[in-house]
């Protein structure tokens, strides 16, 4: 074969190879385009998944932050991984990153946690279904639910604590229990008081006659005088008991929120000054009219102020204030007295319970009875050697269907 023929064959082979390469390149371009399109689709799907995941995380985070229940998430070592705002509010500060001993101290639950506290499951078992009082506020009850977080694939992941503020629920339970107990006690006490008063009258009469006849014998006359003093003391106690058991029938009329408090302070001012107690007042917002019984309110306020004075035997300060809002008026009485112990706090409204040697234990019980009758509630916060705050919360208007108050009024400004 001549050189020309071989050259022609070579060109033909080159041409065929070029065509094959061109076809292969076209197919490669097509494949690249398909892969690029698939990659774009997967990238968009991934971006959408990430957006949805971020949205879900944000949504769950907002739910967590807006829960009224405190939530703590722990790792396997008991360290706080996540805590919502309510949990940090109950603990009094930030929680994420705290070790077991640290958040246990912050929540005041050390008595429930036996060492070693690094063992997660026993720690959570000890805390589960427990109710504690916050160390910063002796009147606030927190219920704890604790459980171990598990996964079928991994096993234990950590733990979760739910902190529920049950203070209001406990107060309502205590109030219902107290009402039930006092209702039965009231019926019995009224009967006993009437039975006691009759012989007391006879004793007082005979002792008076005896005192008169012993006018010339001072020593014996003094004994008769002591009998009379004891009878009068018993009679006063019986009178208080009858007052407590007697149904309260309020006569409701428009009452100035600020005015009724100022009048009460004026009445108590002399007794407070004699004990070296400074009294200051503060009133938030405009004065309005509330539908209530002014005389019963004064009785409540006087009892609370005199009770505060008795807690400040060495002098101190009594801050009296009122605030109106959300259809209610709140009266606050804050003293710097000796305070009330945690043990005594649940019992202070119980009849005949008194922290003073010569107290009858009926003052706060009568206050509670009047406030309940007026459709309100009374709360107390107290710490020993710091002082107490009594808060009386009353509705600005009693519902017309309520038979306790016959009058109705349109709320107005003074």
Image: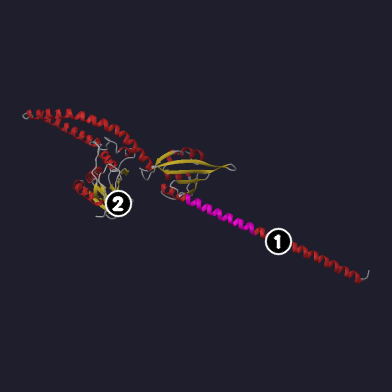
Location of residue 88 in the rendering, given as x and y in whole percent from the top left corner:
43, 49
**Magenta residues: mostly which secondary structure?**
helix
Location of residue 238 in the rendering, given as x and y in whole percent from the top left corner:
21, 33
Q: Residue furthest front?
A: 401
Task: Name which residue lies at 7% across and 28% down.
Answer: 213
- Check the picture and name the quadrant holding the N terminus: bottom right
Picture layout, residue 83 above or below residue 231: below
Location of residue 28 in the rendering, given as x and y in whole percent from the top left corner:
74, 62
Please name the residue that numbered disc 1 is placed on: 32
* Magenta range: 40-63
- The answer to which quarter of the image holds residue 285 is bottom left
As rendered, which of 100 and 59 lies closer to the eye?
Answer: 59
As rendered, which of 190 and 7 lies closer to the eye?
Answer: 190
- The answer to which quarter of the image holds residue 226 is top left
Examine the structure image and report whether residue 43 is included in the region drawn in magenta: yes
Quick one: label 2, few (<14), some, or many (20+) residues within 10 Å? some
Tell me the element at label 1: helix
Q: CA distance from mark 2 to mark 1?
A: 75 Å
Please name the residue that numbered disc 2 is placed on: 323
Task: Name which residue lies at 78% across and 64% down.
Answer: 21
Q: Residue furthest right?
A: 1
Examine the structure image and report whether residue 120 is included in the region drawn in magenta: no
Tell me the element at label 2: strand
Picture layout, residue 231 above or below residue 249: above
Left or right, 26 with respect to 86, comes to right
Left or right, 142 with respect to 339, comes to right
Regarding residue 306, the answer to whether it shows in the image is: no
Regarding residue 12, the answer to whether it shows in the image is: yes
């Amino acid at each position: 074969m001549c050189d020309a023929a071989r050259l022609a064959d070579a060109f033909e082979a080159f041409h065929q190879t070029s065509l094959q390469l061109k076809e292969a390149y076209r197919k490669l371009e097509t494949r690249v385009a398909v892969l690029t399109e698939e990659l774009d689709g997967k990238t968009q799907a991934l971006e959408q998944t990430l957006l949805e995941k971020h949205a879900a995380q944000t949504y769950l985070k907002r739910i967590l932050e807006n829960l009224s229940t405190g939530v703590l998430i722990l790792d396997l070592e008991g360290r706080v991984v996540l805590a919502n705002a309510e949990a940090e509010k109950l603990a009094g500060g930030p929680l994420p990153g705290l070790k077991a001993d640290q958040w246990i101290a912050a929540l005041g639950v050390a008595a429930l946690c036996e060492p070693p506290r690094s063992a997660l499951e026993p720690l959570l078992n000890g805390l589960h279904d427990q109710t504690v009082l916050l160390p910063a506020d002796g009147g606030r009850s927190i219920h704890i639910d604790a459980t171990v977080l598990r996964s079928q694939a991994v096993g234990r992941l950590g733990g979760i604590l739910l902190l529920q503020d049950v203070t209001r629920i406990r107060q309502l339970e205590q109030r219902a229990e107290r009402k039930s107990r006092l209702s039965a006690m009231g019926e019995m006490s009224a009967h006993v008081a009437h039975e006691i008063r009759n012989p007391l009258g006879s004793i007082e009469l005979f002792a008076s006659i005896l005192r008169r006849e012993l006018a010339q014998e001072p020593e014996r006359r003094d004994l008769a005088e002591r009998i009379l003093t004891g009878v009068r003391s018993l009679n006063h106690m019986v009178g208080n008991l009858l007052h407590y058991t007697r149904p309260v029938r309020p006569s409701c009329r428009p009452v100035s929120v600020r005015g009724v408090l100022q009048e009460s302070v004026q009445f108590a001012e002399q007794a407070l000054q004699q004990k070296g107690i400074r009294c200051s007042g503060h009133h938030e917002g405009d004065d309005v009219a509330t539908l209530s019984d002014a005389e019963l309110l004064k009785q409540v306020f006087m009892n609370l102020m005199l009770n505060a004075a008795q807690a400040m035997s060495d002098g101190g300060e009594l801050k009296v204030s009122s605030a109106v809002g959300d259809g209610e008026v709140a009266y606050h009485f804050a003293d710097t007295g000796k305070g009330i112990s945690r043990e005594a706090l649940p019992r202070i409204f119980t009849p005949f319970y008194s922290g003073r040697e010569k107290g009858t234990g009926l003052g706060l019980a009568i206050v509670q009875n009047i406030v309940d009758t007026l459709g309100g509630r009374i709360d107390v916060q107290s710490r020993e050697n710091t002082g107490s705050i009594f808060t009386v919360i009353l509705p600005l208007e009693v519902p017309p269907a309520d038979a306790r108050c016959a009058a109705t009024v349109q709320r107005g400004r003074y």
